[in-house]
Structure formats: structure tokens, C-alpha cells
Image (cartoon, grey):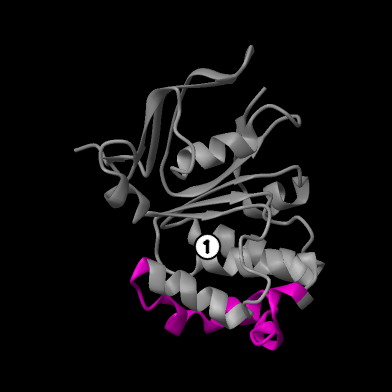
Amino acid sequence: MTAIPLLAVDGLAMRFGAQHLFNGLDFTAGPGAVALVGPNGTGKSTLLTLLAGITTPQAGTIRIAGHALTQAPREAKQRLAYVPDESVAYDFMTGAQFLGMVDALRGTRDLAHAAPLIAGLGLTAHMGKRFAAMSLGTRKKFMLAAGLMGDAPVVLMDEPTNGIDAAAKAWLAELIRQQGASRLLLFSTHDNELIEATGARLLHLG
């Protein structure tokens, strides 16, 4: 019996005006690290928003652990997490409030078990700080913590090492390498060191 892929893309098409970003894009992925690579402007970030169900493709289907994003969005989105390149938190929120909000929206108790993740990313001392007072790198690490806490089998990350310090980057690479045994971690990147450290297979665009 063939296992259901964690991510299956069939005939995906998306264009903006006369520019075709994808036309008949097909791929499947199971557990492991996958690096989405290609020149700027080839649609890496757009593809991630399509896979996360934030943007709707003009053609094609996306299945998360067997659930179609268009036909069964609730079931599909319960099985994925998305880390954007930029912070989506309100400036007045503290780090703890943001992670608590994410936990509440998911209806889980993931935050109760996230202490090792928070410590590993160097966020323990920043939990009470408001986003308005955080550096861009700290904001990015909170986005990573929100996406990685919990047990979603598919984690999508847009440029996960952008702006973060070397220690957090090394810790994240090791986490991706370890968690690839049981979940799919698909990330866009220009960071060849991250690709090498995680042993990610490459998915080329453009």
C-alpha cells in the first residue's frame, strides 16, 4: 500500500498579467527537508502562499496529507504551519502574547511544550518584550517559533534564516535535520549553508 504524500501538487498554474510564474507545476514530497531555490522573481514566496492556502491558484490542486486545500480547507490547514518572511504580529503584542494567540487560534496546547524551542531560538529573554521594541531578527525568530511549535506534519518557511544570528541559525538547521524524519519542512532560501546543514533536497523554480 502506497503512503499518502504529505504534500502533493498537481497542475499548479499562476500568473500575474503576462507573466507565468507556474504553468502545470507538479511535485510530491514526504517527510524531510526541501529547499525551494531559484532567482528572485521566480515565485518562491508566491508558491509558499499557495501551498499555505493564503492565495488561491488559477489552476491545479494542492493536497496536504491527502486533503485538498480547496475542497477540505479546514482539514488541510490543520495539518500545516506557515512561517512568513516578515512579522505578522501587532506591534503592541509581547512575544508571549503572540505565541499564546497562535496557540489559541489553533485550539491546541502547543505553547505548554514549546520551552525547548523558545530557548533554542534564544527567545526566553524576549517573551515579555513588545514587538515594537524587537529587532527584525528577534521578530523573525518568533515567527519561526510559532510555525515550528506543535506537530503539523507540513511546515512551510519563507527565507527562515533571514536576519537571525549565527547561533539560532545553527540550532534551526539541526532542528530541521532532526525533524525531517517525521515531518516535511519546505523552505525558500538563498542560504547555501542552510541547505548543506539540513541535507535538504532541492526544488528549483525558474
Can residue 170 be seen here? The reply is no
Say if the magenta span includes residue 182. no
- Going 77% across and 66% down the picture, which residue do you hit? 137
Say if the magenta span includes residue 123. yes
Residue at numbered disc 1: 147
On screen, 23 above or below 27? above
On screen, 108 above or below 13? below
Q: Residue furthest left?
A: 1
On screen, 41 above or below 50? above
- Going 40% across and 74% down the picture, which residue do you hit? 104
Residue 164 in the figure: left or right of residue 203 = right
Residue 1 sits in quarter: top left
Range drawn in magenta: 106-132
Q: Residue furthest top?
A: 18
Can residue 115 be seen here? The reply is yes
What quarter of the picture does the C terminus occupy? top right
Residue placed most toward the observer, 125 or 56 = 56
Q: Amino acid at mark 1?
A: Gly
Residue placed most toward the observer, 69 or 160 = 69
How far across and how far down the image is residue 53, in percent?
A: 43, 42
- Going 72% across and 28% down the picture, which residue do you hit? 41
> Tag 1's secondary structure?
helix
How far across and how far down the image is residue 20, in percent?
A: 60, 16
On screen, 49 above or below 98? above
How far across and how far down the image is residue 27, in percent?
A: 45, 28
The crowd level at tag 1 (other Cα within 10 Å; few <14, some 14-19, many 20+) is: many
Residue 65 sits in quarter: top left
Residue 163 in the figure: left or right of residue 124 = right
